[in-house]
Image: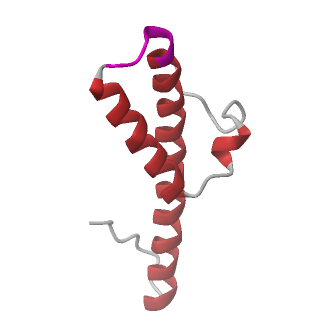
Amino acid sequence: MKDRDARTMPDNITSLSFEEALSELEKIVRGLEGGQMKLEDAIKAYERGAALRQHCEAKLSEAEARVQAIVQRSDGSLDMKPMN
C-alpha cells in the first residue's frame, strides 16, 4: 500500500495539530492491539492510523526545518546542525 500525501489525506486529519493526531494514533494502536475489533473496523482503523502517522511525520519534518533555520540565524553560519 502506497503512503498517502497531503492531497489525498482527509481534511479532518490535515487540520489536526501534531499532539491531536498523535493522541488519536495512540488510541487506534491500543484498539488494534486489543484485538476486539471486527475485521472491517480494524482495516479502517489501520488506514486512518497510517494517515495519522504520515501527518505526524510531516509535522515533525516541518518543526525540524524551523529549528534548523533558527540555529542558522543565531550563529550566522550556513551549516546545518544535526537534530539529536
From where the camera sits, is residue 29 visible?
A: yes
As for residue 38 lying within the magenta part, the answer is: yes
Numbered range of the magenta stretch:
36-41
Please state if 58 lies on the left or on the right of 7 as rendered. Answer: left
| Residue 79 x/y as whole percent | 41, 73
Name the foreground residue: 18 vs 54: 18
**Residue at the (47%, 16%) spot, across then down:** 43
Please state if 82 lies on the left or on the right of 12 as rendered. Answer: left
| Residue 24 x/y as whole percent | 48, 45
**Residue at the (44%, 18%) spot, across then down:** 42
| Residue 58 x/y as whole percent | 53, 49
**Residue at the (62%, 34%) spot, across then down:** 5
Name the foreground residue: 75 vs 64: 64
Q: Residue furthest front?
A: 36
Residue 77, above or below 38: below
Q: In which quarter of the image is the C terminus?
A: bottom left
Q: Which residue lies furthest to the top in this view?
A: 39
Residue 19, above or below 21: below
